[in-house]
Image (spheres, grey):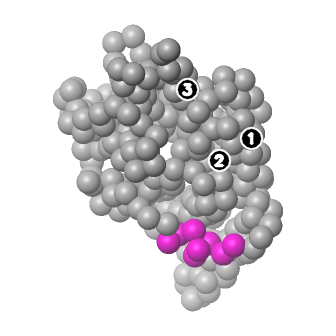
Amino acid sequence: MPHSPIRFAALGDSFTEGVGDPVPGGRRGWAALLAEGIGDSHRGVEFRNFAVSGSLSGDVRDRQAPAAAAFRPDLASVVVGVNDTLRRSFDIRLVARRLDEVCALLTGGGAVLLTACLPDPGSVLGLPAPLGRPLARRQSAVNAVVHALSARYDAVHLHVSDGAWVSDRSQWSVDRLHPAERGHRSVAAGFHALLAARGLVHGAPPGREPEQPPPSRADSLFWLATAGTGWLVRRSTDLLPQLLCLAGAEVRHWARGTSGQLDRRADQALQGALADVTPEGRHVASVLSAPRVSMEG
């Protein structure tokens, strides 16, 4: 009797939808590349990508997770949170509760979770410190929550925030926020290695070398003059006014030598979020010591 296919569901935002990895007829992305290496000639794979560009943690919980749960996946990737950090209404406790609900729903149906910690947009874009630090604090908090939930639900967790990988421009598309084909292939290969260590994949790992040429400087300028301008305007109407206020606070605290107050406030909010989703009281340090797969390997 033939084996039933391995069901793989991908949830998240543009990172998982495949932005930055265009192929004829649409987008591909790391999740589709990974799906190609999950099955083999004896057992195939059925892949569905529920990710939608621009999604917040609430969108994943309210729309994507119920649809994915109905698919009854064996593997389910949940990679989301960067868009939450780019919103004026960012609340780490709310993000943590939403992600916890998504993880509980999917694992309750028997799925093995795939999760990832991501770099903050400020570091990828190379923003000045007063603008970048508030975003870095937010993404650091999201990553800490993802680490804790990954440990709680025994997820296959990939570190995608390594400095060397973030600074490698060949990994990033023209918008500097989404992986290029090489970056998507790196993520897919990283997840494949972790899944193989658990005996959860049967096919060959995806190749790391891109099939398409990397974006040129002209491509970057064209994106900025067309789609990039619209992206900046949309983000500015929501985030920029508050981000400028946060940057002003950074400068004032730096001048007074009281920058530690901002770090303590962020840490208090994070501890409250972790208390909500890890009732047993695990500390962040205990989950940060999990084995890593380097994005450079």
Q: Residue at x 35, y 62 (%)?
A: 163
Secondary structure at badge 1 equals helix
- Labels in figure, total: 3
The residue type indicated by label 1 comes to: Gly
- Direction from residue 237 to residue 165 in the image, left or right: left
> Within the image, what quadrant is residue 243 found in?
bottom right
Q: Secondary structure at mark 2?
A: helix
Q: Is residue 172 left or right of residue 75?
A: left
- State which quadrant residue 18 falls in: top left
| Mark closer to the observer (2, 1) | 1
Number of other residues with Cα within 10 Å of mark 1, as a class: few under 14, some 14 to 19, many 20 or more: few
**Residue for badge 1:** 108
In terms of secondary structure, where does tag 3 sit?
strand
The residue positioned 75% from the left and 29% from the top of the image is 66
The residue that label 3 is drawn on is 7
- Which residues are drawn in magenta? 282-289
Q: Quadrant of the C terminus?
A: bottom left
Question: Which residue is disc 2 drawn over?
Answer: 84
Q: Please report whichever mark, 1 or 3, sits nearer to the chain's N-terminal start.
A: 3
Reading the chain from its start, which is encountered first: label 2 or label 1? 2
Left or right of residue 223, residue 240 in this image: right
Give residue 82's position: percent from left, percent from top. 57, 48
Q: x%, y% of residue 196?
A: 39, 45
In front: label 3 or label 2: 3
Amino acid residing under circle 3: Arg
Please tell me which residue is depicted at 37% across the width and 57% down the height of the picture: 293
63 over 140 or under it: above or below:
above
Residue 73 x/y as whole percent: 61, 29
Q: Which mark is residue 265?
A: none
